[in-house]
């Protein structure tokens, strides 16, 4: 039969467990090997057929500007309705 844990010892053990669990988790993350995803042969898209990053950024900014223009027009229309 196990001896009962004294009342003063229980909070101390709990505090140690609360500190030990994150420490073990961080150590496991640091010691784990990173997973490498090997790309299968023939699945890479050649750079010539991919749009460049600058092109994607430019298109994104164009769409964002169009959305802002639409929003500004809608707000302007609403304000004019309320002012009249």
Image: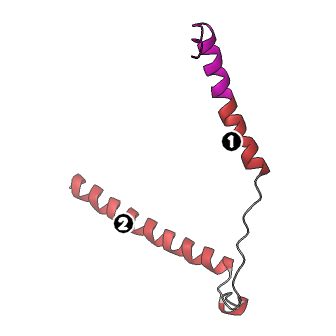
Residue 36, quarter of picture: bottom right
Q: Is residue 3 above or below residue 61?
A: above
Q: CA distance from mark 2 to mark 1?
A: 53 Å
What mark, if any, has residue 54 been given in the picture? none
Q: Give the residue pinned by disc 1.
A: 25
Which quarter of the figure is the N terminus placed in?
top right
Q: Nearer the viewer, residue 78 or 52?
A: 52
Query: In front here: 61 or 52?
Result: 52
Outermost residue toward the left in this view: 84
- Label 2 SS: helix
Identify the image quadrant of residue 76. bottom left
Numbered mark located on residue 73 in the image? 2
Range drawn in magenta: 1-19
Q: How far across and how far down the image is residue 33, in percent?
A: 77, 58
> On the rendered structure, is 54 left or right of 2?
right
Secondary structure at badge 1 equals: helix
């Amino acid at each position: 039969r196990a001896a009962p844990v004294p009342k003063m010892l229980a909070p101390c053990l709990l505090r140690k467990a609360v500190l030990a669990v994150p420490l073990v988790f961080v150590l496991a993350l640091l010691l784990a090997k990173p997973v490498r995803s090997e790309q299968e042969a023939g699945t890479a898209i050649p750079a010539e057929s991919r749009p460049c990053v600058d092109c994607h950024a430019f298109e994104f900014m164009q769409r964002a500007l169009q959305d802002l223009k639409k929003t500004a027009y809608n707000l302007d229309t609403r304000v004019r309705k309320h002012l009249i």
